[in-house]
Image (tube, rainbow, N blue to C red):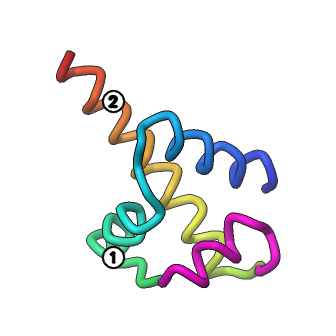
Amino acid sequence: MKAERDKIRIMLLNNNLSQVWLINQLADKGVATDKAELSSALSGSRTGAKIDKIISASLQILSDYEDWKKKQV
């Protein structure tokens, strides 16, 4: 799971996206979270089913964003 958390942080950084942007995208996908919960999820200090959902949805959102961005070039 650490690799997935690291990948999310790297993808946000590489695409100049913020955690606030990701929180809004998660909300659009029906995954409600806030800054503190997302930060805890990415740091690994919280675990559980909801955190797993946040991580997997975040990876999908960021992957979809990168695919969309490649098509724009």
Question: Considering only vertical position in the picture, is 14 above or below 25?
Answer: above
Say which residue appears at 50% left-offset and 34% top-offset: 14
Extreme residue in the left direction = 72
Please identify the quarter of the rendering in which residue 68 is found: top left
Along the polypeptide, which appears first: circle 2 or circle 1?
1
Residue 57 x/y as whole percent: 48, 61
Residue 62 x/y as whole percent: 43, 46
Mark count: 2
Question: Considering only vertical position in the picture, is 63 above or below 43?
Answer: above
Say which residue appears at 80% left-offset and 69% top-offset: 44
Q: Answer whether residue 72 is magenta in the image.
A: no
- The amino acid beneath tag 1 is Ala
State the mark number for residue 2. none
| Label 1 secondary element | helix
64 lies left or right of 57: left
- The amino acid beneath tag 2 is Asp
Residue underneath mark 1: 27
Residue underneath mark 2: 67
Please identify the quarter of the rendering in which residue 10 is found: top right
50 lies left or right of 29: right
Give the quarter of the figure containing the C terminus. Answer: top left
Magenta segment boundaries in residue numbering: 34-46
Say which residue appears at 33% left-offset and 76% top-offset: 27
41 lies left or right of 73: right
Which sits in the foreground, 39 or 32? 39
